[in-house]
Amino acid sequence: MTTKTSSALQQLIDRYDASVFELGRASARIRLAGTAMQSSDVILDGRTARLVPSEDNRRPDALLSADADTWSEIAEDVRGGMTAYRSGRLRVRHDLHLGVGFLAATAAPGNGRLRFRQIKTAKGSISVTEAGSGPAVIMLHGLGATKVSFLPTVAALAGSFRTIAVDLPGFGDSVKPIRAAYDPAYFAGTMLALLDALELDSAHVVGNSMGGRVAIEIGLRAPDRVDRLGLLAPSLAWLRDRPWAPLLRLMAPQLGLIQPAPRTAVEAIVRRVIPGAQEEWTAAGIDEFLRSYLTPRGRAAFYAAARNIYLEEPRGPHGLWTRLPELEPASLFVWGKRDQLVPIRFADHVREALPGARHLELDCGHVPQLERPKQTHAALADFFAPAAVQMAVKGGAR
């Protein structure tokens, strides 16, 4: 390792601020590696960080790889780390929560600084990543994903909003109760408990896929707690026949406690979900999925949530499409023209149910915030801006 690189890494360690990143475990090992340099390990204990020679026979909890120039760039301004990550010059593998949390804890203080913490709620502990200040925006990920899928959105909107990306219960680093329903009502109740714990009367809510369905449920159940909804390819109740429904109703999702799927099958699922995103995001998505899925509780939560998506009733007194016209908060729907999971033709049904909703169609698949980030984030910022301005005016009038 060159003296320049060694100095850059030590500069990161010297800036480490444990108050920014709640480790959530007794200790962790992060490997810092790159071309033409000897790797080093960072040992975190929840209070301090120390740099030690790497031990090749020990697998790190997270792996950060970059060349020497990129490490120097990150040491000068860690915001360059996210730029390097998006461009592929920095790779974060195994545990993105841990790797990005370390980068956040070594950043210079500022309004845009990421913060990682566990929030104790009446429904259990919820893991969040947040940045910025102003009107709150809660961000909810899709099935099998984590809050990491909203990292670009957190950064993009942090200049005007308090952005909060959430690990839904059962996923990432949040609580994973065995017997929870993992249906929209359960997730919505937990997110309302999170708003209570954060002492937020209301917030904008952004949701992708399953997270979009949860956002809709929050809007239906507690419209006074929702300012506006940003719905990115939201999961919606199937309108066609569901031939496997009778069999699935008989199967207990707790079978996931003992029955993992092979990694090759998992990778195929993730690549189908985010086909248009860059390769690094796809690889990170696989790592994040496996991090929860390879635990018995995470696997059971995934199976339960997937089962509920398939079994949700479209019509009848409790059917989603029957209830959807009652949705009060102003809503922006963002659709992917190449989405294989929530086909864009669902937009026609939404227009019929919610004639006042806004719609944006993008040339992407199922995860607009990763596949078309600039267009998605600009649309969200514009949609939320009127409420932000109104709140600022009210605040100035007091």
Image (cartoon, rainbow, N blue to C red):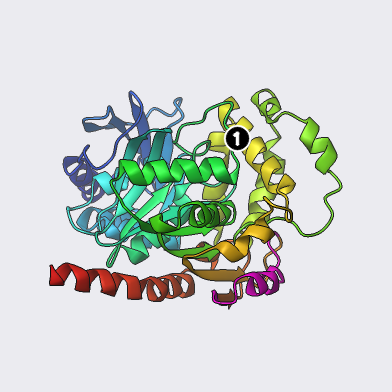
> Residue 238: horizontal and vertical position, in percent?
74, 56
Q: Quadrant of residue 315?
A: bottom right
- In front: 268, or 50? 268
Badge 1: how crowded within 10 Å, few (<14), some, or many (20+)?
A: some
Horizontal arrangement in the rendering, residue 124 relative to residue 342 (left or right): left
Horizontal arrangement in the rendering, residue 319 relative to residue 385 (left or right): right
Quadrant including the C terminus: bottom left
> Residue 280: horizontal and vertical position, in percent?
52, 55
Residue found at x 18% / y 57%: 110
Q: Which residue is mark 1?
A: 181
Q: Is residue 323 above or below residue 375?
A: above
Camera sees residue 97: yes
Q: Quadrant of residue 158?
A: bottom left
Residue found at x 84% / y 36%: 247
Outermost residue toward the front? Answer: 317
Specify the segment rendered in magenta. 341-358
Residue found at x 23% / y 46%: 106
Q: Amino acid at mark 1?
A: Ala
Circle 1 SS class: loop
Q: Quadrant of residue 382?
A: bottom left
- In front: 144, or 396? 396
Residue found at x 30% / y 60%: 80
